[in-house]
Amino acid sequence: MGSIIRVNNVAKVYRKDNFDIPVLHNLSLEVEEGEFMALMGPSGSGKTTLLNLIAGIDRPTTGEIIIAGIDIATLSESALAKWRADNIGFVFQFYNLIPVLTAFENVELPLLLSPLSKGERKIHVETALKLVGLEDRMYHYPKQLSGGQEQRVAIARAIVTDPLIIVADEPTGDLDRNSAEEVLLLLDRLNREFNKTILMVTHDPYAAGKAKISRHLEKGDLV
Amino acid sequence: MKIFKLVFKNTLRHKLRTFLTIIGIAIAVIAFGLLRTVVTAWYAGVDASAANRLITRQAISFIFPLPYYYKERISQVPGIEIVTYANWFQGVYKDKNQFFTRMAVDAETFFDVYPEFKLPKEALDAFKKERRGCIVGRDIAKQYGFKVGDIIPIEGDIYPGNWEFIVKGIYTPRDKTTDGTQMLIHWDYLNEKMEQDWPGRANEVGWYISKIKDPAMAGGISKQIDNLFANSSAETKTEDERSFQQSFMASVSAIITAMNLISFVIIGIIMLVLGNTMIMSARERTREYAVMKTLGFSAKHLTSLIMGESFIISCIGSGIGIALLFPIVSGFEMLIPKGYFPIFRIEPITVVFAVMAAIIIGIIASLFPLHKALRTTIVEGFRHVG
Ligand SMILES: Nc1ncnc2c1ncn2[C@@H]1O[C@H](COP(=O)(O)OP(=O)(O)O)[C@@H](O)[C@H]1O
Ligand SMILES: [Mg+2]
């Protein structure tokens, strides 16, 4: 198995009000296919920034990011959007579900961009919700769910398109111990049973312990 | 449109806010429609005026009469086909609120000069034969149930006395701009009565109407007519019917101009109301738009999402407004004296305007929030605190 993610000499500088804020300095990182990697580090060290670059929702200032052989920094905005839809599943700290959509509809959302029929979408959505153990909450709205349940819906949304890579930014950061445990077990299962490559940002050593490997970021450098 | 469901659900997200916005748009559309209807009603007289008719009136004021013998002299001006004349008779039918135009006209010539008052030949002949006869417009005939043979009692004011007229015919307005609410009596009959009772007021004409061959000659012919009577005790002022109508309502023209303007200002206000709602909604959803972009939704999708919502609200509001406009205009018509505006109705163009405005407003109100949603990068969207 080769490296599915190759980050080569990537630097990221944010510009804000004519100030340059350098966040990542010539950072390189490789992740094997089927890996479950935890990215740790103090707040403000650039973990989210790195994750965003790898997930193709932000662009590096210099350097290249090659995912499964594609240098995503060279893709056009619309090509990148399509690439994300096909390859990446996202899990955020604050779940980011659409409040007016039911669990089912939230999970269905990314499939609306696919050519799947309504019936096919239903099968996929139900499978994903079953996998996260929420088949009995399909028609609940986010505000009718607990934080842990919301995050599991978000995980179902991330996997429903069967992406190559799942990125999770502090997925347990807003959850109590038990809910966090459920989410981590789920990620672990996705990694083991479905061989998903997972990149998880966390500053919780317990959560990081569930990953196969952890890397540390300090002030924009991997240590 | 798979995301239509989301557009719809977004619309209902803040039910009260959406409801208030819709009501605001509906009220504005009603105000717009009502103002436009009043403005068109005012201009209907002008629109209905023919370019080939000249009106000659007393130079100082419309209220002073002209001598009857002017008719012969005016007839001799080259370019004039027929001359007819009329007096404002008015009087009171039942009570002062039954306000429809009552004029004394020359039965021989009036309907030749006003072909838009369509009257069957038999009715015209019957009218000519009966000195106390009258012709009424279809609209008042319907409203008051006047039938041929009925007697209409009028209490005179300008021409005192208790008058009675026998309906000899009902004219049909040629089209929607033609006034269907007039009552026409014999000038000859009126004049006879004046000779008997008020000899000083006999042989007086309110105004002359000349039908000319070529509207392009209106200016020259008007001048020639007025020159005939220059330096006499009753000088004249002749102008084409349109100018006459306009000067007749000159006193209200400032108000009409203001109403005209306000009706369009209202459209601007609707735009602000909806724009404000859309901006608030879009700001609250900054994160959601970032999520959707992350999932691969494109600018096209966000455009349908935001514009679609704006559009739905605008269309529902306008739809309700237009639906309510019709009963409200009818109600308004009942409040104003009968016949005050001969033609008071919602012009199709007003509805077309309102619908077009709704569409354009729906689009414009969403432009700013849309621009903002598209310009915000995903990363900025997620960092947005709101
Ligand atoms: N869009 C941005 N504009 C300006 N500065 C940013 C932006 N995103 C992140 N930063 C800054 O970059 C640094 C790293 O941020 P981040 O990657 O979010 O760190 P972490 O996730 O490790 O807490 C912080 O100092 C943060 O303020
Ligand atoms: Mg972070």
Image (cartoon, coloured by chain):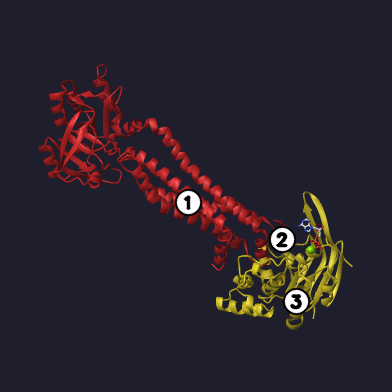
Chain colours: A yellow, B red
- Residue located 72% across and 60% down the image: B382
Q: Distance between the residues labelled 3 and 1?
A: 51 Å
| Residue B75 in sight from this viewpoint | yes
Chain of the residue displaying label 1? B
Does the beta carbon of the residue at mark 2 sit less than 8 Å from ligand 1?
no
Q: Where is residue A77 in the image (x, y as percent from the top left)?
A: 68, 62
Q: Where is mark 2, residue-wise?
A: B382
Q: Position of residue B248 (x, y in %)?
A: 33, 31
Which quadrant: the C terminus of chain A? bottom right
Which element is circle 1 on?
helix
Residue A182 numbered tag: 3
The answer to which of marks 2 and 1 sits earlier in the sequence is 1
Is B296 or B167 nearer to us in this picture? B167
- Identify whether A118 is placed above or below A73: below
Left or right of B362, for residue B189: left
Chain of the residue displaying label 2? B
Q: Position of residue B318 (x, y in %)?
A: 47, 53
- Identify whether B192 is placed above or below A60: above
The quadrant in which residue A3 appears is bottom right
Q: Where is mark 1, residue-wise?
A: B26
CA neighbours of label 1 inside 10 A, class few (<14), some (14 to 19), many (20+): many
Kindly identify the amino acid type of the residue bearing the numbered disc 3.
Glu
Q: How far apart are marks 2 and 1 (CA)?
A: 36 Å
Which quadrant: the N terminus of chain A? bottom right
Q: Please count the marks in the image.
A: 3
Left or right of B204, for residue A106: right
